[in-house]
Image: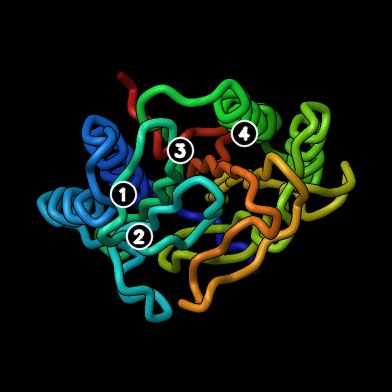
Amino acid sequence: MIICKSESELGFMREAGRIVAETHRLIAQSIEPGITTGELDQIADKFIRSQNAVPSFKGYNGFPYSICASVNEELVHGFPGKRKLNEGDIITLDIGAEYRGYHGDSAWTYPVGTISDEAKRLLDVTEGSLYAGLALVKPDVRLYTISHAIQQFIEDAGFSVVREYVGHGIGTELHEEPQIPNYGTPDRGPRLKPGMVLAIEPMVNAGTRYVRTLEDDWTVVTVDGSLCAHFEHTVAVTADGLEILTKLDA
């Protein structure tokens, strides 16, 4: 069942989204060669808690950290730790915050110093695919029309869409219905309605689409070792379009 949120519930979700967006902005200022992924996790944890919220991911199905920090060929669910970032790396930070029982969720892939042209194009295309999908969010649009637009944008650029991991509804649970694949047939799937809140999140590989999970049972990497990227916003469907809840006004 897809849950439509009331205006009061959306108020809590706006605040959760703001906290997530502010956390991203804060962490982005610290991304540089030499910093460890564990230090980024500590920055995020401290800030989220200072906002009268808690990290959504810590303890979720046993996940032991406050953010996911995935470097280069790591797609999602990377463990923060002692790994130091190097010039030319890319790092995906997936951040969630729970405020008064409601969640916000956003991922972004960042460059570390100067990155290769291939890596930059991968980031540009993945972010572009997110906004290609968001441009179609409005009432009565069928969900997989958005999925198809994301897929087309990515594949037209010569990159691969990961199929094992998808976006999702979000609210009092971090993951709610519906599942939102980044591929699909247009004019299929449930119709969007005002009050639906969705976490839309393209995940893109520079090489083949295939991924595998490491022995920690969490970290997902590309099978061929190619770079990958992940961009995500939490958005609410409104009467005439959408509201991005995890984007700062300025």
Front label number (3 vs 4): 3
Q: Earlier in the sequence, mark 2 or mark 1?
A: 1
Q: Is residue 157 visible?
A: yes
Residue at image mark 2 = 102
Q: Is residue 8 left or right of residue 213?
A: left
In the rendered structure, find residue 126 and report the number of the disc placed on it: 4
Q: Are marks 4 and 1 in contact (CB under 8 Å)?
A: no
- Residue nearest the observer in this picture, 13 or 98: 98
Residue at image mark 3 = 90
Q: Is residue 169 left or right of residue 16?
A: right
In the rendered structure, find residue 46 and report the number of the disc placed on it: none
Specify the farthest residue to the left: 50
- Residue nearest the observer in this picture, 51 or 92: 92
Q: Is residue 103 left or right of residue 179?
A: left
x then y, percent, for residue 196: 57, 50
Residue at image mark 1 = 16
Q: Amino acid at mark 3?
A: Ile
Residue occupying the point 28% across, 35% down: 33
Q: Are marks 2 and 1 in contact (CB under 8 Å)?
A: yes
x then y, percent, for residue 47: 15, 48
C-alpha distance separating marks 3 and 4:
13 Å
Q: Amino acid at mark 1?
A: Ala
